[in-house]
Image: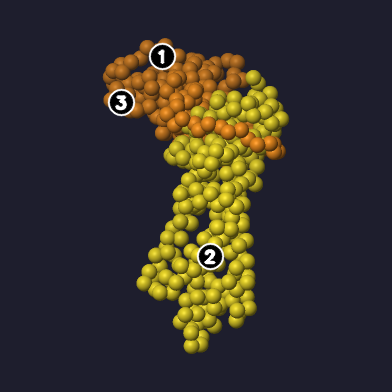
Chain colours: A orange, B yellow
Amino acid sequence: MNDSPMPELSRVPAQIAPDGDVAAPEFLASLLADGDGDMAAWVISQALEDRSRAEVYDKVVQPAMELVGIRWQQGRWSVSVEHLASVALNQALSRVRPPENPESRVGPTAVLAAPEMEQHVAGLACLAQVLEDDGWHVENLGANVPADDLVSFISTRNVDIVAFSIGTVDRLDKLREAVDALRTAGGRAAELPVIVGGHGVTAIEDLVGASHVCHSLSDAQQFARSLSLSPGDNDRR
Amino acid sequence: MEDTELLARIASGDQQALEILHESFAPRMYSVAMRVTRSERLSQEAVQDAFMAVWQYPRRFDPTRGSLGPWLFTLARFKAIDAVRREAAIKGHTAEVDLELYEAPDDVHDEVWRGLRRARLNAAISSLPEDQRRALSFAFIHGLTHVEVAEREGIPLGTAKTRIRAALLRLRAALETELSEGGSPGAGGESGGVPGMGDRKRASEGPSGRIRSGLVRCAIRVGSIIEQSLKVAQFVTAPFDAEPTAAAGGSRQ
């Protein structure tokens, strides 16, 4: 302990603009682990003022959740804390969601899903917002979607892209099954652009039948943009 | 300058190093605190408290667990939550006192007691050393924050807190002594102990029961005041005793 007298510190001028934002992954991770979705949303929204959504999610949110996972693996944080962090992240993301606009209702449609048994869906939630920002209409099916059911769902709708995400390599087989099911379904579903991403695909060397393996949200965004779809293209909705 | 070097300089008592740190991070820490407290006053306090913790325990920062900025932001957030907690305690405390003051305003015994209580408190406060009396007065009569007391007195925040804490402890000691000596009129002498709830019935017996009953109520309130003083002392002393243990994103403080 430092026993010497502390120097006089000036008051912080209330009107001063913060010199840079506070959106550091470590800070966000600690907020999420504390279940502070409100402050996590504020931190994310601060970063969004200066940077693109894809960049913020790639460089702040994703590393923060990785830290949560690492600390859980190291035994520093419990399963409960990890779950609390996931819930807090969902709360935060829902608060920073892009504003809905009329065009997004008629925009190209993206279907997002985690394959069967996959429970990690934070990446999908982030991707949904990144695509919505670009005018996509997003149908996020969330966790644990059976391949057959997904094929039935897609065959009844007008879909322009399908995105899968897996949190661990353990779900690689299920991911392959889901992509195969689409590719063998026949009709338009067989030719749909399919992108795969998430922490579990970092080890993928082949494309597992997908059109593109995304290593970041920016990467996914670029691929989606390369399809050159715009609002109104989807006239069969 | 590297984070670790800066912290090492702070650990060696280098005041300039703390000022550099303050200049770099205080605005953002203030933003974090504002998000928690929504109060400029509490946020200023939180930032000051955070830097006091950094000054006192710079080695709590573990560079292997994260960088300095997030650690400071986390610290500011915890201090801000502490500030909100203290504020809530003060508000609850004030409400209790107000409730007591306005209770049965037409009761002559209450009127008598208010006078007695005021006199005792005034006597106890007057016995305090000048610097402690002034700090206490600023904090609890004028309602200034610790930071504002420090500014008003031109002293470091830590000194201001120390004075207030010392004053409260002295007051507590003074009022406790009074009670243990049967200082509450009419109650202590016969019961031979500290008057409390159990003395009410006994005190109301006899020809001057009504007056004694009133005095016993006074005694009960002395107990209440001491209890409140202890609560105040507890939250005032808390920042001194609590060591920051939070590494960024690590354990909670």
What residue is shown with label 2?
Answer: B120
Which of the numbered marks, if any, corresponds to residue B148? none
The kind of residue tagged 1 is Arg
Alpha carbon distance from label 3 to label 1 = 19 Å
Query: Real-space Cα distance between discs 2 and 1?
Result: 78 Å
Give B201 or B75, whichever is nearer the viewer.
B201
Instruction: Look at the image and tell me in which quarter the N terminus of chain B lies.
Output: top right
Depth check, front residue: B130 or B204: B130
Which amino acid is tagged 3? Asn
- The residue shown at (39%, 73%) is B107
Query: In whole angstroms, how far apart are the C-alphas of marks 2 and 3?
Result: 68 Å
Residue B153: percent from left, percent from top: 54, 41
> Horizontal and vertical percent for residue A175?
54, 25
Q: Taking A44 as reference, is B245 left or right?
A: right
User: Which label lies toward us, 3 or 1?
Assistant: 3
Q: Nearer the viewer, mark 2 or mark 3?
A: 2
Badge 1, how many Cα within 10 Å: few under 14, some, many 20+? few
Which residue is labeled 3 in the image?
A101
- The residue marked by circle 2 belongs to what chain? B
Helix, strand or loop for disc 3: loop
Q: What element carries label 1?
A: helix
Q: Residue at x 52, y 38 (%)?
A: B151
The reply to whether label 2 and label 1 mark residues of one chain is no
Between discs 3 and 1, the one toward the N terminus: 3
Instruction: Name the outermost residue toward the bottom.
Output: B207
Q: Is residue B171 left or right of residue B84?
A: right
For disc 1, the marked residue is: A225
Q: Are marks 3 and 1 in contact (CB under 8 Å)?
A: no
- Residue closer to the observer: B110 or B7: B110
Q: What residue type is labelled 2?
A: Arg
Q: Nearer the viewer, residue B133 or B110?
A: B133
| As drawn, A115 above or below A224 | below
